[in-house]
Amino acid sequence: MDYVNFGSTGIQVSQLSLGTMLFGSTCAENDAIQLTHRAISDGINVIDTANGYNNGLSEEIVGKALIGHRNDVVLITKVNAKMGNGVNDGGLSRFHILKEVENSLKRLNTDHIDVYFIHRRDLNTPLEETILAMDQLVQSGKVRYIGISNHKAWEICNSIMFSELHNLDSVACIQDLYNIVDRDVEVELLPFTENFNLGFMAYSPLGRGMLTGKYLVYQKPPKDSRAGRGDVRILESGMRQHSMEVAQSLKPIAEKYGKSVSQLAVNWVLGNPIVSTAIIGPRTFEQYENNLGALGWEIDSKDAELIDQLVPPGEHTGFGFNDPANPVLGRP
Ligand SMILES: NC(=O)c1ccc[n+]([C@@H]2O[C@H](COP(=O)([O-])OP(=O)(O)OC[C@H]3O[C@@H](n4cnc5c(N)ncnc54)[C@H](OP(=O)(O)O)[C@@H]3O)[C@@H](O)[C@H]2O)c1
């Protein structure tokens, strides 16, 4: 496993991070704990969770898995998800963040979070209020670094300027969607990341499973797949005809290297030098082992060009199943 500096921070992160969104749902507790131990023993030193993953259950399982391993990893969690019925039980207000961080610390069974991520935008709260609350957490020692996910480059830039102006701790890293069929971040967010020397974590390197080649146009998704189980996230965003076609076109390229499409897809993400780490989200040990095969080799420039022809830099493929603009597939 190779490690790189996480942006301008002094921490080193592994090429692969372990995503735990499925812990407590399709990845049961015992498997999840064993998977975490295996990842740590393979050199993965970043564990990515969020308070909202399975309503706190993912954090609880990660907390159990890290007993005896807490100091071996960079522990990431996130805030914004709705965690209760009250009107203020979610979002990015100081009110919610200062309360919810205590719940995350309890579930994670730790006294500090290494990187605390603003999970997604909250249009009801000025980002300045959020940054002030995050800075307070850094000063109190409950958080080491601040991260931001699913925001526009200009919003992050504003927040950094605000932090600098007021001598606050500022955003150190970004987490966003990046893979062969979702290249939008190449337009604005990745150049911004590079320019500001931030860390970049690419999530969904397999397009939530699309870039495995297991989904075929006009065929029902396999029963044991995310789409087959009716997962809204993939159905609403990832499930696109062109993505399925791209995955099939990637097969001969992957085969040249003796690799699977999914290994090619993760390797491709890591081939972008602005990316610090790709967050894999395996559901099973078999998938995890397969994901590891993404490491230790390089896609040559001719094949990189072929991939650019399938999905040009800065672009993404077609429409989602649930997108009314999708003329072909409709809801499966
Ligand atoms: N910041 C954010 O807003 C955000 C958003 C999304 C994710 N994330 C983070 O990123 C992590 C990864 O996201 P993701 O789950 O979308 O990643 P992904 O790597 O794009 O998709 C993972 C899914 O693909 C399938 N898969 C994985 N390896 C496979 C293999 N070798 N063969 C066949 N299928 C395979 C599995 O689904 P099935 O087998 O069930 O089909 C697995 O759950 C999450 O756990 C989370 O930590 C963050």
Image: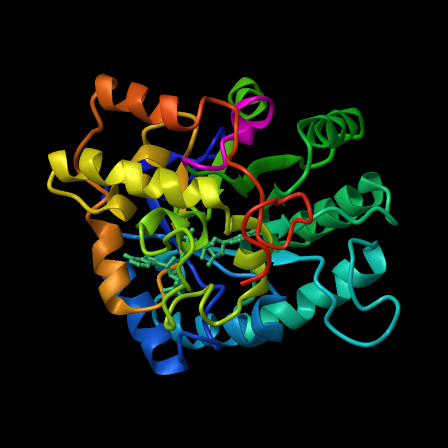
Q: Residue at x 27, y 60 (%)?
A: 288
Helix, strand or loop for the magenta stretch, by majority = loop
Q: Residue at x 63, y 66 (%)?
A: 52
Q: Nearer the viewer, residue 116 or 193?
A: 193
Residue 290 in percent (x, y) is at 22, 55
Find out whether residue 103 is within the magenta segment.
no
Q: Is 64 on the left-hand or right-hand side of 164?
A: left
Q: Is 95 on the left-hand or right-hand side of 195?
A: right
Q: Is 42 on the left-hand or right-hand side of 113?
A: left
Residue 311 in percent (x, y) is at 43, 28
> In the image, is residue 6 above or below residue 96?
above
Q: Nearer the viewer, residue 84 or 8?
A: 84
Find out whether residue 183 is within the magenta segment.
yes
Residue 12 in sight from this viewpoint? no
**In what quadrant of the picture does the N terminus appear?**
top left
Residue 87 in percent (x, y) is at 88, 68
Write down the quadrant of residue 40 in the picture. Answer: bottom left
- Magenta residues span 180-189
> In the image, is residue 4 above or below residue 291?
above
Q: Residue at x 45, y 37 (%)?
A: 181
Colouring method of the image: rainbow
Q: Is 130 on the left-hand or right-hand side of 251?
A: right
Q: Nearer the viewer, residue 52 or 112?
A: 52
Q: Residue at x 21, y 59 (%)?
A: 289
> In the image, is residue 46 above or below residue 182?
below
Q: Quadrant of ligand 1?
A: bottom left
